Image (cartoon, rainbow, N blue to C red):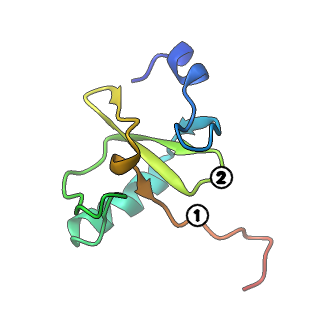
Amino acid sequence: MLDVELLDILVCPQTKQPLRLADEATLARLNRAALDGALKNRAGEVVRAPLDAGLLREDGRVLYPVRDGIPVMLLDEAIEVDPAPDPGVAG
């Protein structure tokens, strides 16, 4: 688990947006994609290892993996996330 004080000071290295811990539903969706071989990081490498935790950018579009309790804040390691649809928006 991440230290709350650390989480309060971490921001996206690209946009400087605040980060929050990814919820279980987001992690489950990404882990299903990883099992299918369909999850890639920004460097284009397939992410096969399941994510135990991640830091989600405020806009919900990018996740930074947390490995062994350590946030990996490298742009190439970031994972593009399709944000969950807004239930109030008709599609």
Mark number for residue 83?
A: 1
- Mark 2 and mark 1: Cα distance apart in space: 8 Å
User: Which residue is at the front of the view, 87 or 61?
Assistant: 61
Q: Which residue is drawn at 31% across and 58% down?
A: 43
Q: In which quarter of the image is residue 40?
A: bottom left
User: What residue sits 58% from the left and 36% below the top?
Assistant: 19
Where does residue 17 sit, x and y in percent of width and height?
65, 39
Q: Where does the image place residue 49, in percent across and percent down from the top left? A: 19, 51
Residue 68 lies, with reference to residue 37, above or below; the image says: above
Q: Percent position (x, y) of residue 7?
A: 54, 24
Where residue 34 sits, quadrant-wise, is bottom left
Measuring 35% from the left and 35% from the top, which residue is drawn there?
72
Residue 57, quarter of picture: top right
Q: Name the residue under label 2.
A: 59
Question: Of the residues tagged 2 and 1, which is closer to the observer?
Answer: 2
Helix, strand or loop under label 2: loop
- The three-letter code of the residue at mark 1 reads Pro
